[in-house]
Image (cartoon, rainbow, N blue to C red):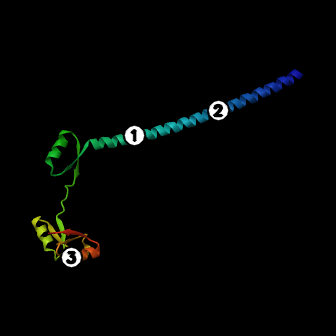
Amino acid sequence: MMTRVIGFIVALMLLNIAEVQAQGYLDGLMNRATESAKRKAQDRVNQNIDQSIDKAIKKTEDTVKCVATDRECLRRAKEEGKQVEMAEAPTTKDTMKCMVSDTGCMKQAKAQRKNVEIEDESELDTLRCSMTDADCLKRAKAMGKKVDIID
């Protein structure tokens, strides 16, 4: 009878140990599965980012910017099999800002075939003054303006 009781106690202990080991094994499996899922998700995100970057680089390499009137640029792009992205022609500043009293500025604009925009002296960043025009130089100093010496 005593051996039966001891055998029963030993059997219970072995079952308890086996149950604890099985629980630890299941926890380990769950942890590994969770970590594996996280790694795969991160790998997929990284792969999508890499594909997006590669696509953007390829588009940049396969695209040429040309001004619509630049026949040579358009021809080269077509020969190289590249897409053309139209760019605006560089604009030239065709307007000069002059004061009504600054005939030198107006003559210069006319010589350069530019339009003249009449400005009030207070709106100009730079005043055009002759070295001998003390009033102009004093006004520029008083208003904190730059001076462009015209003679």
Label 1, label 2: how many angstroms apart (C-alpha)? 36 Å
Give the number of the disc on residue 136: 3
Residue 131 location, x and y as percent?
17, 72
* Contact flag, marks 1 and 2 (Cβ < 8 Å): no
SS for dot 1:
helix
Q: Residue furthest bottom?
A: 135
First reached walking from the N terminus: tag 3 or tag 1: 1
First reached walking from the N terminus: tag 1 or tag 2: 2
Quarter-wise, where is residue 35 in the image?
top right
Disc 1 vs disc 2: which is toward the camera?
A: 1
- Residue closest to the eye, 60 or 145: 145
- Residue closest to the eye, 95 or 3: 95
Residue at screen point 23% across, 41% down: 82
Give the number of the disc on residue 26: 2
Which amino acid does the dot numbered 1 rest on?
A: Asp
Which amino acid does the dot numbered 2 rest on?
A: Leu
Label 3, label 2: how many angstroms apart (C-alpha)? 91 Å
Q: Residue furthest left?
A: 111
Quadrant holding the C terminus? bottom left
Disc 3 vs disc 2: which is toward the camera?
A: 3
Label 3, label 1: how many angstroms apart (C-alpha)? 62 Å
Residue at screen point 53% across, 37% down: 37
* Contact flag, marks 3 and 1 (Cβ < 8 Å): no
Q: What is the number of callouts on the image?
A: 3
Residue on which the image places disc 1: 50
SS for dot 3:
helix
In the picture, measured across the screen, residue 85 lies left or right of residue 25, that is left
- Is 33 rendered above or below residue 108? above
Sort mark 2 into few (<14), some (14-19) or many (20+) by Cα contacts within 10 Å.
few
Residue 129 location, x and y as percent?
19, 72
Which amino acid does the dot numbered 3 rest on?
A: Cys
